[in-house]
Image (cartoon, helix red, strand yellow):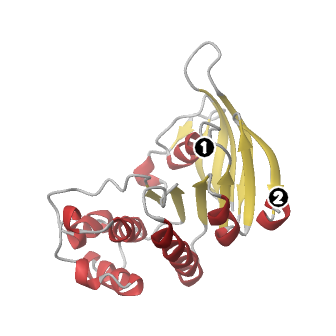
C-alpha cells in the first residue's frame, strides 16, 4: 500500500500549499479535482521529482521519503513507473527503442523481450520501428505506457495521460488502461479532472481541491 503524508508550499506569498495524507491500495486510485488543485504535485512528490517540505511517503515496507529521518530516495531507486501528460518520447528513437530505454537495468527478461511482450499486450507491434512523429496520439500514449511498465515498477503513476487525445481514442485507451492494470496487478495512481475517466477507471477516488483532500471513496458515490 502507498501511504503518503505530504506538505509542500509551491511558490511564495499566497501560493498553493499541498497538505495531504493519501493511501492507495490495489487497483486504480484516482486523484480527481480541478486544474491547479495540486494533483500533479502530489504525484511528483510520490515519484521523487518534487521534494516535500515535510512528510513521509512509503510503499509497503519501502520508505521513499521521511523528512524526520533525512530519507529521500531518488526517483530511479523508488521503483515507480511514470507516464507524463505529454508522453516525453525521444523523437530520434523508434517506438521500440523508446520503450527499451525505460527497461534498462531490469533484472528479469531481457529489455527487448519485455518490451515486445508489452507491445503485443497493447496491440502496437506494428509501431515498433516507427518514430514518434509517425505515431498517432493514441499510439504515442501506448508506447509511453509500455516504457513505464517495462521498468517492472512497484507502482504506476499516470498524470492525465489521455488529455491530448480525441474522445473516441480516450474511450478506447481508458478501457485498455483498466485491462492492463488488471493483467499486471500493479497498483495505479491516476491523475485526472475528467469525470468519465474517473468513473470508468477508479476503484477508489481521492478528491483534491486547493492542495487538500476533501473526500475519499468509490467514484460512483462521490460523482453521482
78 left or right, relative to 76? right
Q: Which residue is mark 2?
A: 222
Taking depth in this image into account, of 68 and 209 the one nearest to the observer is 209
- Residue found at x 67% / y 42%: 56
Label 1 element class: helix
Q: Quadrant of the C terminus?
A: bottom right
Q: Position of residue 70 (x, y in %)?
A: 57, 34
Where is 74 relative to 7, above or below?
Answer: below
Q: Is residue 161 above or below residue 121?
A: above
- Residue bearing mark 1: 42
Q: Position of residue 59 (x, y in %)?
A: 63, 58
Badge 1: residue crowd in 10 Å (few <14, some 14–19, many ≥20): many
Residue 66 image point, x, y percent: 63, 39
What is the quadrant of residue 9 in the picture?
A: top right
Q: Marks 2 and 1, how far apart in space?
A: 20 Å
Work out whether 32 lies above or below 36.
Answer: below
Whether label 2 touches label 1, CB < 8 Å: no
Identify the mark nearer the N-term, 2 or 1: 1
Amino acid at each position: 500500500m502507498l501511504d503518503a503524508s505530504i506538505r509542500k508550499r509551491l511558490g511564495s506569498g499566497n501560493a498553493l500549499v499541498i497538505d495531504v495524507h493519501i493511501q492507495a491500495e490495489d487497483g486504480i486510485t484516482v486523484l480527481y479535482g480541478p486544474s491547479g488543485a495540486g494533483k500533479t504535485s502530489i504525484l511528483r512528490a510520490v515519484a521523487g521529482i518534487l521534494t516535500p517540505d515535510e512528510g513521509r511517503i512509503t510503499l509497503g515496507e519501502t520508505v521513499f521519503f521521511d523528512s524526520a529521518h533525512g530519507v529521500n530516495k531518488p526517483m530511479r531507486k523508488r521503483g515507480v513507473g511514470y507516464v507524463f501528460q505529454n508522453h516525453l518520447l525521444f523523437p530520434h528513437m523508434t517506438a521500440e527503442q523508446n520503450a527499451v530505454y525505460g527497461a534498462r537495468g531490469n533484472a528479469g527478461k531481457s529489455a527487448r523481450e519485455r518490451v515486445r511482450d508489452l507491445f503485443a499486450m497493447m496491440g502496437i507491434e506494428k509501431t515498433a520501428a516507427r518514430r514518434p512523429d509517425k505515431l498517432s496520439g493514441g499510439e504515442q500514449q501506448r508506447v509511453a505506457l509500455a516504457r513505464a511498465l517495462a521498468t517492472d515498477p512497484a507502482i504506476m503513476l499516470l498524470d492525465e495521460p489521455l488529455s491530448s487525445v480525441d474522445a473516441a481514442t480516450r474511450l478506447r485507451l481508458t478501457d485498455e488502461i483498466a485491462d492492463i492494470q488488471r493483467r499486471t496487478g500493479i497498483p495505479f495512481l491516476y491523475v485526472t479532472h475528467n469525470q468519465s475517466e474517473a468513473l470508468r477507471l477508479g476503484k477508489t477516488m481521492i478528491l483534491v481541491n486547493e492542495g487538500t483532500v476533501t473526500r475519499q471513496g468509490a467514484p460512483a458515490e462521490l460523482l453521482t
